[in-house]
Image (cartoon, rainbow, N blue to C red):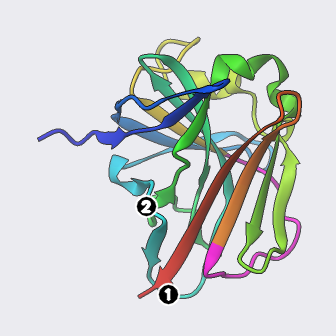
Amino acid sequence: MSSSFIFRPHIYDGNTITTPDVLIDNVYVADSRGKNLSVSRITNDRLTTAPEIQVLGYDTIAEAAILLIAAGAGMLMGIASNHKYINQENPQLFSKPISRQVWRFQHVADHWEYLSIQLSCGTGEMIQNGKLAEFAPIDEIIPLISSDQSSLQQGTAVLCVGLPMLKSNEPSSSYSLKLFDQEKDQVLELDYQVSQI
């Protein structure tokens, strides 16, 4: 039995939406906080498009992430949450909600650094807000993951994190993420609920 995560994205091409099946075989979290860029691999079953995730305990938080997927149709870009414990950086522990809406990376590559991402909690309070220029450049991430120094292997997904927190992040029962492309007047959105068990 295949361990691939079957992702059915809604790819936005102007006024057209396509919904292919994309098989994801390898998943990584690339963290550019601090001075050093680090990459951790997580299992494929951590990814989810479900509107709710379950967590153990009350001390978990969201973290805004840029989602990159190497697909047969080319690189796709979405948003995700690197959900985790407040005081523990192990990215494997919880599900990672990902947006079903994605863009083709080639359509934003020339102004990537000017895109902005926001994360807010259920009360509407902003937790993270910044430009993608604050994340590690993609050409620095790829060599840490792929033997091909210039591109990701098809079926690879990367959650890129590294945006500073605006405040002390406290647990919430829901989160909302948005990625803005002001040049093309487009927005990607991801909302999810958190259930403690």
| Kind of residue at disc 2 | Ala
Instruction: Locate the N terminus by quadrant.
Output: top left
Mark 1 crowdedness (10 Å alpha carbons): few <14, some 14-19, many ≥20 = few
Frontmost residue, 188 versus 134: 188
- Magenta includes 194? no
Frontmost residue, 18 versus 140: 18
Image point (73%, 73%), residue name:
121
Mark 2 crowdedness (10 Å alpha carbons): few <14, some 14-19, many ≥20 = some
Q: Is residue 112 above or below residue 47?
A: above
Q: Quadrant of residue 64?
A: bottom right
Image point (76%, 75%), residue name:
169
Indicate left or right for 28 with 139 as reference.
left
Residue 87 shows up from this direction:
no
Q: Position of residue 51 (x, y in %)?
A: 48, 65
- The chief SS type of the magenta part is loop
| Kind of residue at disc 1 | Gly
> What residue would you read off at disc 2?
50
Secondary structure beneath dot 2 equals loop
Contact, mark 1 vs mark 2 (Cβ under 8 Å): no
Secondary structure beneath dot 1 equals loop
> What residue would you read off at disc 1?
57
Frontmost residue, 15 versus 168: 15
Indicate left or right for 24 with 40 as reference.
left
Q: Position of residue 77 (x, y in %)?
A: 61, 32
Image point (38%, 36%), residue name:
26
Q: Quadrant of residue 88?
A: bottom right
- Magenta includes 169? yes
Q: Position of residue 140 (x, y in %)?
A: 69, 25
Mark pair 1, 2: CA separation: 20 Å
Instruction: Locate the C terminus by quadrant.
Output: bottom left
Span colored in magenta: 161-174
